[in-house]
Amino acid sequence: MNQTKEKQAEAQAEASENAAPKAAASPAPQPDPSPLELPDFSKKNRRRKLIKRLAAGLVVLALAFGYFGLRGDKKDGQANQGVQYEEVSVEKRTITETLTGSGSLSPAESYVMTTLVSGDILEAPFEEGDMVQKGDALYQVDHATVTHSLEQSQLSLQQSQRGYSQAVERREDLQIKAPRAGQLISLNVKEGDTVAAGQQIGTVRNSGVMRLTLPFNETDAAGFTIGQPALVTLDGSFETLEGTISVVGASQALAGGQTVRQITIDVVNPGAIASGQSATAAVGGAACNSGGTFDYADEAPITAIMGGDVQTIYVQEGDQVYQDQLLVQLYSKDLEEQIKNSQDAVRSAQLALEGQTDQLGDYVITSPISGTIIEKNYKAGDKLEVGKTLCTVFDLSYLKMTMNVDELDVSKIQEGQTVQITADAVEGKVYTGVVTKININGTSNNGVTSYPVTVRIDEFDGLLPGMNVDASIQVETRENVLSAPVGAVARGNRVLVKKPESAQPEKDQKEEEPSEDGAPAGYEYRQVELGLSDRTYIEIVNGLEEGEILAIDPANLDPMAPMGGMSVMVG
């Protein structure tokens, strides 16, 4: 039985040798059938697509192994003998480079609402599927306890503000001012002195008006009025001056039973009158009972309302000052500390009130975006605890996806580029998206960096958030260029080209041996310059002519790509 099988195998092998061009007896070097190493633009495609391609590839390999099994009687050095190549012609075509990727869809915006407070839910006026607007109240939680605390914080702030205002007002008491207009007669302090509260530090006097107080008989004085003219006579010089009644005193009894009234007369000082000068006066022909002495009409002490250290003195003795003019500035360390503490107390009360107010706002939970309620976990009447998830809101005005683009290709992507979107969940439909963002914060994995590219999809009927989709972006197109299948290009950018002689009738061909570079009989390896690729075909920039025939090992072809050539056996 075994001998019979061996004979059958030898017969099949001999038939194959007779049908193909004869090779030299010496074994040919093993050619390098490895395909061109191109960037894997589909490395992010979904696993099931890769499985389909691998399955198809396994079929091709199985056929190849089956054939080689039939050729098992050949010697080890004849590895190229009996390989069935696919022949294709170098042609012109349009090549479009496309970047592909995959990802899952997400809404334009999404928020998972969680709570910062605990309490009973009073209101929750919405249901799953409802549309809500930004700022709409989704939950109202009982806030009675917080309201009470808020009122306490308001009272505390008011008290702190009053304390601060009073402390600041006391700072004004450290300013010593002129009690009235006049001449600064004395000033008894210097900078650096310590002054006690109520201490007199100087005197201010109005020496332009002199005052004379004299007794008049009750009968005469009863008819006197304030502002009535009086004639004053100076003792010694008997000089007379005009004056005016400024005060009409009450009746008073003198010794001997005589009743008088004290009448005060103001006289403009001509400059020669001094305090203690004696004089008499008459009013309307009625003379005074006795004389008296002049005194200054307006003289007042300068006293400190509050104690402190003299910080600045603004005047000198003899200066003319006006009423309420600042004369001396005091400084009190104790008061400044009190003001600072009061200020801190006000700020602390403000922060407490702000915190209570903000916390009160947490009891009314509003939607941060306009969108659709896709999940509701709590309803009115439920007891709420801090940190619980209340509901989820999706903005479904559009969908978006993120595809990762290799560092070698990200420069080809621009905002505004059109993206074709497909989904296995919606067969036969292609959606259109647009690139809205290219994130420059890339991520590295195994020495390769990729960058997230965001794609927006406005028309998404049939698509839902969470669905897996595939995306492709056409980045460049070249028309009417020479091209060859990607599988025809081996490492080093070499292709296996059929020699012109091998196209002659078999009877005119001479027995040809394999070339030194490992090419089988009738073929030669040629170096080519490559250009754009669409994964199935690649542009040939230089090295080939249109119409030339290439030989391809079927194992190097994309199992999912069409094969338009004819099969030949090289043996």
Image: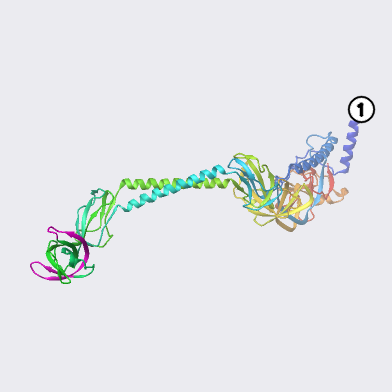
Q: Viewer-proximal residue, 351 or 198? A: 198
Query: Of the residues shown, which amino acid type is indicated by label 1?
Result: Met
Tell me: 493 left or right of 511.
left
Q: Which residues are magenta?
A: 230-257
Residue 401, x across and y down, in percent:
68, 49
SS at badge 1? loop
Residue 109 is a magenta residue: no
Q: Viewer-proximal residue, 65 or 343? A: 343
Q: Please tell me in which quadrant of the rendered image residue 298 appears.
A: bottom left
Q: How is the image coloured?
A: rainbow
Residue 155, x across and y down, in percent:
46, 46
Q: Is residue 540 visible?
A: no
Q: Viewer-proximal residue, 281 or 16? A: 281
Residue situated furthest top in the rendering: 1
Chief secondary structure of the magenta span?
Answer: strand
Residue situated furthest left in the rendering: 236
- Residue in the picture at 87% in, 37% down: 13
Q: Is residue 55 visible?
A: yes
Q: Quadrant of the C terminus?
A: top right
Residue 392, x across and y down, in percent:
66, 45
Tell me: 24 left or right of 271.
right
- Pointer 1 residue: 1
- Residue in the picture at 57% in, 46% down: 362
Q: Quadrant of the N terminus?
A: top right
- Residue in the picture at 50% in, 47% down: 354
Q: Please tell me in which quadrant of the rendered image residue 176 appears.
A: bottom left
Q: Residues within 10 Å of mark 1 (few under 14, many from 20)?
A: few
Tell me: 318 left or right of 333.
left
Instruction: Please say if 35 is above or below 210.
Output: above
Residue 447, x across and y down, in percent:
62, 42
